Amino acid sequence: MGRELVSIHVGQAGISVGNSVWELYALEHGITADGMMPPSDTTSSLGGGVEDDSNNYNTFFSETPQGQHVPRAIFVDLEPTVADDVVRRSKLYNPDYVLTGTHDAANNYARGHYTVGKDMIDQLMDKVRKMTDKCDNCQGFMIYHALGGGTGSGFTSLLADQLMQDDYKRKTKMLFAITPSPQISGSIVEPYNTTLAYANLLDSTDLIFNLDNQAMYQSCVKSLQLERPSYQNLNRLIAQLVSSLTASLRFETSLNVDIHDLPTSLVPYPRLKLISSAYAPLLSKSNNMNAYEASSVHELTTAVMTSNHNLLTNCNLTAGKYMGGVLM
């Protein structure tokens, strides 16, 4: 029985992050840029053999009769620029599940939720129904977006409302939300969009992973020793986090974690569902000594629990209490 997950990438940030995530998924499973998988006796560029008789990768990929592996992903944006540049040029994605409009939300929550976004929500829900109907047992949704923009805040809130009202109320909904930071901000209205979005998303989703550009930027500078990190570096850092989170769903492991187990472990009270994320180890290419040293469980646990250089959310770990945690 399948345990499929449907990924929905909303807005410019969600599409850009999603492209990095699927790029890493394909690399880990030995899937080429055109969606084909080489024979099982070959090795992937990660250095290991691509031998997975369990076909657990079908959690995120669907296979066509021609043997092409297509991501179970829907890309949506209210304006076509990023989707055309990132998604439509790739042979990996199904172009039928790329939705774009003609007018953007102009960094306005109301335009994304009530006016421009409302005109596109029916098309998106139709695509969601078609994709879930092709699943044997769809267990939930993973939504990627940014809270500072009009599309990522307003349209994602509208999408979450629709998923709660339709046949997907019992499906787990996990959000990977890029939150605005006090020092790196592209618009003065980002805090307002974020506040309005949180007021809606806290009641219509199960988990919200907060990802902060400023915290990730500091991690790239301090841990990865990158002088001027690009948005691609930040997106690939998020991809590593998502890959680690879903590894037990895509590979045969002794750790049998279902997506429904995450809210059970991480949400102590119904509205306390904003998750701080950390990733370890973060190693730079220039530090060759790390290649000959194995990190212990104690070192990795200490790094993700106490070090701000491994934290992907801009907060003070020592100022509060841990009420729940998952190490994967």
Image (cartoon, rainbow, N blue to C red):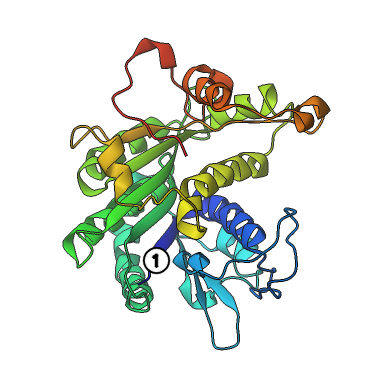
Residue 156 is situated, as x and y percent measured from the top left of the image, at 34, 52
The residue where tag 1 is placed is: 4
Quadrant position of residue 53: bottom right
**103 displayed left or right of 109:** right
**198 displayed left or right of 131:** left
97 in relation to 313, above or below: below
Residue 163 is situated, as x and y percent measured from the top left of the image, at 25, 60
Q: Residue at x 41, y 11 (%)?
A: 318
Task: Report crowding for label 1: few under 14, some 14 to 19, many 20 or more residues within 10 A (C-alpha).
Answer: many
Quadrant position of residue 240: top right
Dot 1: element: loop
Residue 100 in view of the camera: no
**126 displayed left or right of 19:** left
Q: Residue at x 50, y 59 (%)?
A: 250
Residue 296 is situated, as x and y percent measured from the top left of the image, at 60, 26
Type of residue at label 1?
Glu
Question: In the orientation shown, which residue stands out farthest toward the front?
Answer: 254
Q: Nearer the viewer, residue 279 or 234?
A: 279
Residue 1 is situated, as x and y percent measured from the top left of the image, at 35, 72
Q: Residue at x 75, y 57 (%)?
A: 45
Question: In the orientation shown, which residue stands out farthest toward the bottom?
Answer: 65
Residue 127 in view of the camera: yes
187 in relation to 93, above or below: above
Q: Nearer the viewer, residue 124 or 110?
A: 124
**262 displayed left or right of 94:** left
68 in relation to 317, above or below: below
Number of marks in the rendered image: 1
